[in-house]
Image (spheres, grey):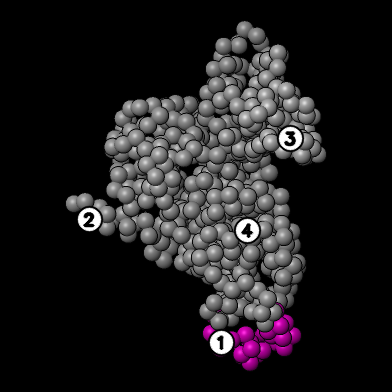
Amino acid sequence: MSQTLREELKQEVAKRRTFAIISHPDAGKTTLTEKLLLFGGAIHIAGSVKARKAARHATSDWMEIEKQRGISVTSSVMQFEYAGKHVNILDTPGHQDFSEDTYRTLTAADSAVMLIDVAKGVEAQTIKLFQVCAKRGIPIFTFINKLDREGQNPFELLEEIERVLGIRSVPMNWPIGMGRELSGVYDRMKNQVELFQGKDHSEIEVRPVADYNDPRIREMAGDYLADQLAQDLELLDVAGDPFDYEKVLAGQLTPVFFGSAVNNFGVQTFLENFLQLAPAPTPRRSTDGEIEPEREKFSGYIFKIQANMNPAHRDRLAFLRICSGKFERGMSVRHVRAGKEIKLAQPQQFLAQDREIVDTAYPGDIIGLFDPGIFRIGDSLSEGGNLVFDELPTFSPEIFSKVSVKNALKQKQYLKGLDQLTEEGMVQVFRSAGIFEDTYLGVVGQLQFDVFEYRMKNEYGVDIQLARTSFQFARWIVSDKIDPTKFRINSTLVKDKNDNYVALFENEYAMRTAMERMPDVQFLETAP
Ligand code: G4P
C-alpha cells in the first residue's frame, strides 16, 4: 500500500509545475496568461481572461473595493494540463497597487516567468518581484514581449537585465527582425527557424536548418535579416553565456525567449521549453528538516488569506500550498499552531474561471480552505506530526500611515480589528517606542490601506483616520552593544508586533548615514 502511494506521489510530483509570472503592469501578463490557458484548454475563447479583468464585478462576488476599482485585490491560482504536465499559475496582481500578498504568493512558486516589454525593458515592479524570487534562489525564465513593436536592441536588453537585476542570461531563441520587420525567431537549441505567417502572425511555420548560416534562411528571410541574424548569433556564441542547466536551476542564469503574446507568437515554444526546464515541486524547509514532496504524510502551509469573497457570508479563504503527501477531501490534519486536529471538508481548487471542490491534490498544488477565522499566514498543517515550515519572510513596507480611531468609544473594536487584520497579514503594525503611543501601519502598496479602511468599517464597524507619513524605509535593528533607544540617528524608533525595534527612515540618505555611523548595528530588511 505504502509503496504504491510513494509511486503515485513520485509520478504526480514529476508532472507538476507551479510558477508565477512577474512583470510590471502593461507588459502583457494578462495576455500571456490567457494564451497559456488557451493552449491548456482551460479556457476556450480568447479574451475571457481579459474580460474577467475588466468586468469581474459582473460575474463574481468579490469585495466591493475590488469591484469599484476593477482589479484583483488578492491573487489567485489557475491550473491546466499541457503535454502531460499539470500546470499551476499563481496569479500576482499586475496593477500598480500590488501588496505584500504578491510577495508572499511568490514563496509558493517553484519558479517564475519574468515578462519584459521589449520597448520598456526592466521596470520598477519587475525589479521588486525579481528580488523576492532571487532571494529564494528559484529559477527565473524570461519572456521578452511585444516584439511586433519597435523596441530596444536585444543585446541592450540582455545587458540591462544583467546590470539592473544581476542575473546572467542565455537567449534560447533570437528574433529575426523586429517591429514591422519581425518575421520569426531562430531557435538556438533546436536549430530551427520559426516563421510567422499570415497577416496577424498567427500561423507559425517551423523549418529545421543546419545552423544559422544555412543558406535557406536567406531564402526565407532575405539577405538583410539573414546577415543580421548570423552576425548576432555569432556574437552570442562567442561572447554569450553557454546554456548551463545547473545554473538555471540555481537561479543564476535566466533562459530568455522572445515573442509576442498578443499575436500568439513564440508562446507555444516558450510553454513547451519552460515545462521541460522548470523544476517540479522542490523540498521545503521545516522543523523536521527538508520535507521532500514525495514524503507520504501530507503537509502544507498557508501563504495567503483572502477575506470576504462573499460578503454575505463573511467567509475567508486560506490558500494552502501542498508540500508533501496526498491531499484527500475530508482528511484530518494537525493545525500545529492551534494544537488541534481539523477536518479539511470543503477544499477548493481554482480553474481559470471558477472555483470548484477538489477531492485529491498533490505537492505543488494550491488549495483554498474555508476559514472561519482559525488560520494565520504561515500556519503549517500536517498529517500525524508537528512539523512547522520555515516562517514566511516579512517584507519591508514602503508606505506608512499613522492610524487612529475616529470615535474613541469604538476603541475596543478598533483594537480587535487591528489585531486580527495584522495577524492575517493585511498590514504591518508598528507602535512608537517613546512616551506617546502612536500607531503606524506599514504596507507595500496603497491598495492595502484602502482595503484595511474598508474592512475596519465593514467588519468591525470602526471609522479610522489614516495620516500618510513621509517614511519610506523600515529596518529591523539588531544590536548587542547599544540600546536602540539611545541611538542618535535621523529616524523614528518604533516596535513591531513582536516588540522588535524598527527604525523608520524618511529617505535613503538618512538610512545610509545611520548605517555608516553605526557599523556594529545590523539594519535588517526583514524581521529577525
Ligand atoms: P498586463 O496584464 O501586464 O497589465 O498587460 P495586458 O496583458 O493587459 O497587456 C497590456 C497591453 O499590451 C494590452 O493593450 C495588450 O493588448 C498589449 N499587448 C500584450 N502583448 C502584446 C504584444 O505582443 N504586442 C503588442 N503590440 N501589444 C501587446 P491595451 O491597448 O491596453 O488593451 P487591448 O485593448 O489591446 O486589449
Circle 2/circle 4 CB separation < 8 Å: no
Which of discs 2 and 4 lies nearer the camera? The answer is 2
Residue type at the position of mark 3 = Met
**CB at disc 4 and ligand 1 closer than 8 Å:** yes
Residue 4 disc label: 2
Task: Give the spatial CA distance, label 2 vs label 1.
Answer: 45 Å
- State yes or no: residue 222 in magenta: yes
Instruction: Look at the image and tell me whether residue 355 can be seen.
Output: yes
Earlier-in-chain disc, 2 versus 4? 2
Above or below, 91 relative to 432: below
Residue type at the position of mark 2 = Thr
Q: How many marks?
A: 4
Residue 204: percent from the left, percent from the top?
56, 76
Task: Give the spatial CA distance, label 1 vs label 3.
Answer: 62 Å
Residue type at the position of mark 1 = Val
Which of discs 3 and 2 lies nearer the camera? The answer is 3
Q: Is residue 279 left or right of residue 91?
A: left
Circle 4 is placed at which residue position? 115
Earlier-in-chain disc, 1 versus 3? 1
Image quadrant for the C terminus?
A: top right
Above or below, 259 relative to 417: below
Residue 69: percent from the left, percent from the top?
65, 38
Q: Residues within 10 Å of mark 4 (few under 14, many from 20)?
A: many
Residue plotted at (63% across, 24% down) = 495
Residue 209 disc label: 1
Task: Give the spatial CA distance, label 2 vs label 4.
Answer: 40 Å
Q: Residues within 10 Å of mark 3 (few under 14, many from 20)?
A: some
